[in-house]
Image (cartoon, rainbow, N blue to C red):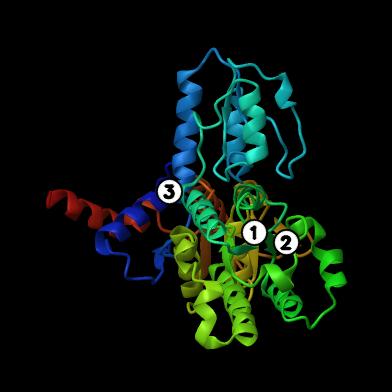
Amino acid sequence: MYESQIIKKVKEARQITDPRKKDASPTVVDFGAVQFVVPRHFGFCYGVENAIDIAYRTVEQNPDKTIYLLSEMIHNPTVNQELQNKGVEFLFETDGTERIPISSLTPDDIVIVPAFGTTVEIQKKLEAQGIDPYQYDTTCPFVEKVWKRGRQLGKKGNALVIHGKYRHEETRATFSHTSKNAPCVVVLNPDEAREIADFMLEKRPIEEFHQKYQEKCTEGFDPRTDLQQFGVINQTTMLASETKEVMQVLKDAAIEKFGEANIDQHFADTSDTLCYATNENQSATYGLLETGADLALVVGGYNSSNTMHLVELLESTFPTYHIRDASELISEREIRHFNQWDKEIKTTENWLPTDTSPLRVIITSGASCPDVLVDEVILEVLSHFDDIKPLKEALKPFEQVTETEKEAG
């Protein structure tokens, strides 16, 4: 349903020429007047594909049942709207606000847990209604891996620092699952990690911690005592480079407090819990910063954390626009796009340079964005130019790669 004509060919060709994923360089799709620079990794990850597959299969196999999603399937409006069009209803808003009371459900109803997972509290409410929360569970395996490591660390006496957005569905779920076994605190970025380090080292009054982090930590959390032994885990869609910085800031504080010789007794190495797909997509985006381009288009939901991080990386070098889909390209003069810093949708004029030849456009997408939406954006950009190669001609190099592989068996 979400397969594309253009991006599919590019990805297939790259898989053939670089099966071990060692070449991080981008691909250029040349339409003559416009060249699209495509990163090595982007778009749907395994966790998202798996979640969509389970959700659609559930709908198809249960035409006579009432089907609910706890909240958005993934942070992509197209996918969520398609599911709603098929009769699926959402129980919660993304911020946790209840839309339909769980108490109104019956044991015959089906509830799909989204890719972000859900909290222990909601699982128990579903069970109280006679609904198995694990029967239609699409929680990403990499999210579950973080939970598992958090539980392991907690049982060994560690506290946990969670790098994430504390109102995000995934972070709420991670906090719920790990706080059963460990004292926890959520930090948004390296700056907040430095604050926690100062509290840990008693360089700032503890009253400041209680004022700022009261809603973001387990009851009674005290960085001076709880961070005697701890580890850092993350919301899988955060910038991996930021998570590593958070880890390093807090490890340095632990070294200052306990000494480098004893650091292994106080700080747990959790670097292997970082999501490989998020890491690959972000690394490929860093690779784009070294290429020449006139602008960048990032396609994805406006509440998609991983998409916003791709925008954050690219806008340091290029005019960058975060768009939901091709409908945001109003004309060659106007583009509607999301500004994450002001948290509002803006309209920008003269976004598309039509007097540059060839125009080079970076195009990428978040992990919850179907490739077909990227195709539609490419075709919409091309519609504003006359002197372009036909689609078949532009894709010919990639067709040849895939045809050669087919001939080789």
- Say few, some or many: other residues with alpha carbon within 10 Å of mark 1 (under 14 / 14 to 19 / 20 or more): many
Identify which residue, 169 or 53, lies in the foreground. 169
Note whether residue 346 is visible.
Answer: no
Q: Which mark is residue 60?
A: none
Rendered residue at 32%/60% (across/down): 14
- Label 3 SS: helix
Identify which residue, 378 or 42, lies in the foreground. 42
Rendered residue at 52%/66% (across/down): 362
Rendered residue at 74%/27% (across/down): 100
To which residue does mark 1 refer?
322
Kind of residue sitting beneath label 1:
His
Note whether residue 130 is visible.
Answer: yes
Q: Nearer the viewer, mark 1 or mark 3?
A: 3
Residue 145, position as x, y percentages in the image: 47, 53
To which residue does mark 3 refer?
46
Q: Earlier in the sequence, mark 1 or mark 2?
A: 1
Residue 56 vs 104, above or below: the answer is: below
Q: Nearer the viewer, mark 1 or mark 2?
A: 2
Q: Earlier in the sequence, mark 1 or mark 3?
A: 3
To which residue does mark 2 refer?
340
Kind of residue sitting beneath label 2:
Gln
Residue 140, position as x, y percentages in the image: 49, 46
Q: CA gap, disc 1 to disc 2? A: 9 Å
